[in-house]
Amino acid sequence: MRLVVVSGVIAAVIVLVMTPVLIRFLRRHGYAQAIRVSTENEPYPEHEGKRGTPSMGGVAILLGVVIAYGITHLIFWQPPTPSALLVLFLMLGLGGVGIADDYLKIFRQRATGLRARTKLIGQAVVALAFGILALQFPNSAGETPASAAISFVRDTNIVLPTALFVLWVWFLVTATTNGVNLTDGLDGLATGAATMTFASYVLIGIWQFNQSCFSTGGPTCYDAAAPLDLAVLAAALAGACFAFLWYNTAPARIFMGDTGSLAIGGAIAGLAITSRTELLLALLGGLFLLISLSVIGQVLSYRILHRRMLLMAPLHHHFEMKGWPEIQIVVRFWIIQGLFIAGGLTWFYAEWVNA
């Protein structure tokens, strides 16, 4: 438990200290994201007031997480586990894709960043590598970081062949990263929602550690390979995102950019896969799923019915077009995310009680 607390505190302190330095550096060099504006054929919410706001704040989150995780293990002289290292690999790999995207937005002033195909290819390479590696590195109990079985609250009886499992991982990673990326359209919206998700994985990791099959056994035990270390990493992620909110809430002094949103999405997917809660992610990341479905629904509505379901997708921009203040949308969506997570944690606990 001490490792979890120390990891979260260190990450929060690092991000609180580092982010203002990053903001000054980016402003001094004029590194601000291009702002999308309305056209005659495509209206867009008025965001002119955000012009000149630095981006790539996700760099501070990534550094805070990596440094906090490393220092925590040095303080307690505990070796890192393959499970947590693989989640870090997934986070940093997707963060690298995000850096390339932000580079085009900031240095080339291309508001759309990387082409969609290029971004998807980059995400696929990292996700497939993670899926292959996650079935390696068994611990002393023979448990690998991930299982080929599809999981909900724990592994189900549906076991996939290795090739299908790797594709399943690719789907989860791509869906989650793009869900977070789509949600990151208003100040603090994605960061606050992600903080709640990471906090839920802290609780899940601690609970699984206390009920681990390696130490307790029985029908209600969990066979995640390294639940406590995943909780340590989730605490660092929660602390980093929580601290970043100080500078990212409206009016934002810095955006996390795709560097942050893709990395955060990857970390959430990685925690779901390694903690054997893949399908539970639909609730623990419920807001991200809702935002993604709003985009899918908008596209299908236009192609099938030749009319738009929303004034604009993603969903938060629909309410902007209706005239809702930005801060009102963000807070209400945070409440929705909190309700999703409460439902997910309740289901997680109820399954253990019933088992």
Image (spheres, grey):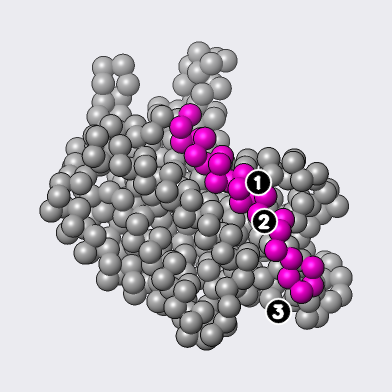
Q: What stretch is highlighted in magenta?
A: 117-142
Of circles 3 and 1, the one toward us is 1
Amino acid type of the residue that numbered disc 2 sits on in the rendered structure: Ala
- Which numbered tag is attached to residue 169? 1
Q: Residues within 10 Å of mark 1 (few under 14, many from 20)?
A: many
Q: Quadrant of residue 147?
A: bottom right
Verify CB contact (< 8 Å) between mark 1 and mark 2. Answer: yes
Of circles 1 and 2, the one toward us is 2
Amino acid type of the residue that numbered disc 1 sits on in the rendered structure: Val
Question: Which part of the image, by quadrant, shows the C terminus?
Answer: bottom right
Which residue in the protein does label 3 denote? 210
Where residue 195 appears, as percent x and y from the top left, is 46, 61
Where residue 250 appears, as percent x and y from the top left, is 27, 53
- Mark 1 or mark 2: name the one nearer the start of the chain: 2
Prevalent SS, magenta region:
helix
- Residue at the spot x=50%, y=26% of the render? 298
33 to 210, vertically: above or below:
above
- Which numbered tag is attached to residue 134? 2
Question: Which part of the image, by quadrant, shows the N terminus?
Answer: bottom right
- Residue at the spot x=80%, y=44% of the render? 161
- Residue at the spot x=28%, y=49% of the render? 55
- Mark 3 or mark 1: name the one nearer the start of the chain: 1
Q: Which of 353 and 84 is in front in this view?
A: 84
- Mark 2 or mark 3: name the one nearer the start of the chain: 2
> Taking 102 as reference, is 216 left or right?
right
Say what secondary structure mark 3 lies in. Answer: helix
Amino acid type of the residue that numbered disc 3 sits on in the rendered structure: Asn
Of circles 2 and 3, the one toward us is 2
Q: Residues within 10 Å of mark 2 (few under 14, many from 20)?
A: many
